[in-house]
Amino acid sequence: MQASIPAEAVRAGLARVLERAEFREPESLLQQFLDWLLERLGARELTALGDVFRVLLALGAGALLFYLIRRFARAARPREGELEPALPAAGTSLQARLAALAAAARDARARGDLRLALRYLFLALLLALGGRGDLEFRPMWTNRELLRRGHASGETRALLESLVRELEPKEFGRAAVSAADVERLERLLAPHLASAGGTA
């Protein structure tokens, strides 16, 4: 009869087998670095390092948040600043500004830049509505702020709500601009150009 092997001997043998390299998962470079770091630093240094890491992480998150907010705010701003080369100097009549914007829109459309043409025409429409007293127009306001704070008349408010909802994704590149979009704004602007003595 075969003698039984003591349980302690079985456990010791099993432990030796499991310690072999083929039974261990290889450590990643990060784990190796962390092990090396832990061997050389005491508890106090590790705590300080953890605090520094948390501060750096918070600063990085804050910087990223600031960057995203700034980028969103720039995208949401009205485009008059970008369109200034097409605008006559300050003090020029509304008629001249509308005519200049309409001409710039035609040029942009001829070059195939429908998004820029759309921006010129929409700005011209806002200026025309402001000049007629249907809207308080301020260049620093976003389109949504114009709706909220611009004291638009009932008909103008309904028109602008529809336009802003439809054109905003197109203006900022989230949707394609079509020739029909540009033509629609040209039609809306035409009566204002005619009453100002301009041409569409």
Image: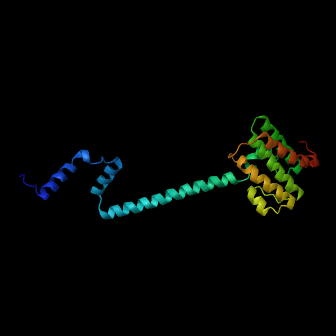
Residue furthest left as drawn: 1
Give the quadrant of residue 6. bottom left
At which x and y percent is residue 33?
A: 33, 50
The colour scheme applied to this rendered structure is rainbow
In this picture, residue 170 sits left or right of residue 35? right
In this picture, residue 7 sits left or right of residue 148? left
Total numbered labels placed on residues in the image: 0
Give the quadrant of residue 199. top right
At which x and y percent is residue 156?
A: 85, 57
In this picture, residue 178 sits left or right of residue 58? right
At which x and y percent is residue 133?
A: 88, 59
Residue furthest front as drawn: 1
Q: Residue shown at 79%/52% (left/top)?
A: 163
The image quadrant where one finds the C terminus is: top right
Question: Which residue is nearer to you in this view: 178 or 76?
Answer: 178
Q: Residue shown at 67%/51% (left/top)?
A: 75
At which x and y percent is residue 25?
A: 30, 48
Q: Residue shown at 83%/49% (left/top)?
A: 124
Question: Which residue is nearer to you in this view: 146 or 131?
Answer: 146
Give the quadrant of residue 51. bottom left
Is there any visible trace of residue 71 in the rendered image?
yes
Q: Residue shown at 71%/42% (left/top)?
A: 176
Is there any visible trace of residue 100 in the rendered image?
no
